Amino acid sequence: MFNRTAIAPLEYTRKLWMRSWVALTMLFLYAPLVVLMIFSFNDSKRNVMWKGFTLKYYEKALNNDSLVEAMVNSLTIAFLATMISLVIGALAAVMLWRFRFPFKGLVEGTMSLPIIVPEICLGVAFLIFFAKVDWPTDLAWPLNLSAITIAHITFCFPFVAMVVRARLASFNKEEEEAAKDLGATEWQAFRDVLLPHIKPSLVAGALLAFTLSLDDFVITFFTSGPDTITFPVKVYSMVRFSVTPEVNAASTILIILTVALTFIALKYQGVKGIAETH
Amino acid sequence: MSGAMQDWKSQKKPFAAVATAPIFWLGLFFIAPMTIVWLYSFGQNAGPADIDISGTLDNYKRATEWLYLSIFLKSLAVAALTTLICLIVGFPVAMAITFAAPKWRPWLLLGVMLPFWTNLLIRTYALMALMGTNGFMNKGLGGLWDGASWLWVLLGMQPLEAWTPVQLLYNNFAVVLGLVYVHLPFMVLPLYSALDRLDKSLIEASLDLGAGHFKTFMKIVVPLAAPGIFAGVMITLVPALGAYLTPDLMGGTDSQMIANVIERQFKRANDWPFGAALSFLLIYAMFILIALQSMRSNKVKEAR
């Protein structure tokens, strides 16, 4: 990194001002998160002075039933939404990639709308929709999460479709034809030839959908009822009404979970592959 | 291309197998809710839980009153300022990633992307904790102030009065800073992908022929990276315009944006038709922005 050869004209990254700029940007991006994580171990109600190491806020957070319930709800919704988005998104990608059909441009355009429409408008739309159709709200767990899960699938599956379709572009159709010539049925050709080809994009799409669902606050805020609190909605009300160090502890757990998921994705895809999905 | 694609009529069964689920979902859980909102925007409250869709335009008329129009314009200004700051901060970062040694590049990219994967609410909360009156930002500013005071004394003048923590949160400054914090990764990634595709020998040629780094940057790098710049601007501007969480948590009474006004119609004010009209106006604004962008990229294609 600090070799002494002269800086070539295009080695902008080796210039001092460029390095400081990147370092400052990274500091801006990471300092708040790092401070939050460090101070979740701080033995003090007020956040600034370091009073000694403690795990008591983790204990408190894990003993806070409504917080744990919100976390379980969030993970359940994210899991269900990811699975269903994966199926619908992959089907949508195959549909758009393989077939010519009437109003194709319209279908394609409409499918990108949930990505473009502001979250607040989508949240409002689901609030009105579920009120209008009298969606039952008193079902047993996990069925009471169905409204939120449906809303999440609607904004997750177009992302999955996008990622899978990009991967399908590199598929050699002759492989599928060869399989059929050799006697494979439509389904066998799909399962044994196409599916293995799009598998990396399915992993990437699933991770994207999972994070999007886990991350969503605005749309959930409009679709959740008093018994269906998710983690972001819970943290929101804790931040709003009483800031407690428990939030730091719970947030740290979620950050570590996110980082772990990202590194699992890295193992599967390589850093470059992850970069390309965004 | 079209030759390789199959007509749906020749493959009815496989087509039905793949098309049913996505089209059904899109129709029932996206088109239907949006249509109901659209219809409500032409309605009026007829009872506590009853909305009469009468075809009235009153909601739209009310939305164009100065009170709401000014909030709309302010949201646009805040989103534009956020986008501009993201562009200025993000461009050198994208350049640095592009010209970094190959073994460093993926890690720098990951460094920019990891916050993007982290929960938005947690990031906003973390930034708020740092900016509070007892937070580190105030401590840092206090330290600078003490240093200035010490310098003052050294120069033989009266020391400055003691540092009082300033209110960094709950104002427009906090909203813009929060939006920049959240949206910076959105800007860097498209910039990087445009710069990565750029032919580096053009920059070398410009430098060899005597142009300085700044001139080369303005005349070669910026025009060639234009598609990435526009993509980055759109991808930052559109969500920033509809931002709800940042102005709600970090803003003061005078820094609410259009999304906060919409939320209030559905929760506290309980005026659903008016809220529906406001959300459709926001959607139309997005469409105009996207249409402008696609017109621009069509022009670029024609020029080539």
Image (cartoon, rainbow, N blue to C red):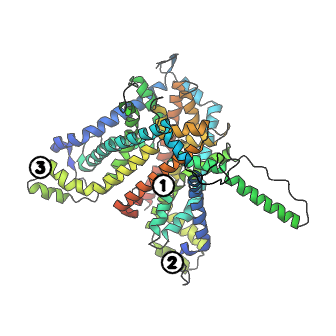
* Quadrant in the picture for residue B212: bottom right
The chain under label 3 reads A
- Is there any visible trace of residue B283 in the rendered image? no
Indicate the secondary structure of the residue bearing disc 2: helix
User: Callout 3: 10 Å neighbours few (<14), some, many (20+)?
Assistant: few
Q: Helix, strand, or loop for circle 1?
A: helix
Q: Position of residue A189 (x, y in %)?
A: 16, 52
Chain bearing mark 1: B
Residue at numbered disc 2: B205
Label drawn at residue B231: 1
Contact, mark 2 vs mark 3 (Cβ under 8 Å): no
Check disc 1 and give the amino acid type.
Ala
Task: Say if A136 sits above or below A265 in the image.
Answer: above
Q: Is residue B55 above or below residue B11?
A: above
Q: CA distance from mark 2 to mark 3?
A: 57 Å
Which numbered circle lies on residue A185? 3
Spot occupied by residue B262 in the image (x, y as percentages of width and height): 55, 32
Q: CA distance from mark 2 to mark 1?
A: 27 Å
Mark 3: amino acid: Thr
Q: On the rendered image, what quadrant is the C terminus of chain B found in? A: bottom left
Q: Is residue A101 above or below residue B300?
A: above
Amino acid type at circle 2 is Ala
Residue appearing at x 83%, y 60% in the figure:
B149
Same chain? Circles 2 and 1: yes
Which residue is the extreme one toward the bottom? A5
Task: Pick the residue in front: B66 or A178.
Answer: A178
Mark 2 Cα within 10 Å, few/some/many (few <14, many 20+)? few
Q: Earlier in the sequence, mark 2 or mark 1?
A: 2
Which quadrant: the N terminus of chain B?
bottom left
Dividing the picture into quadrants, the one containing residue B159 is bottom right
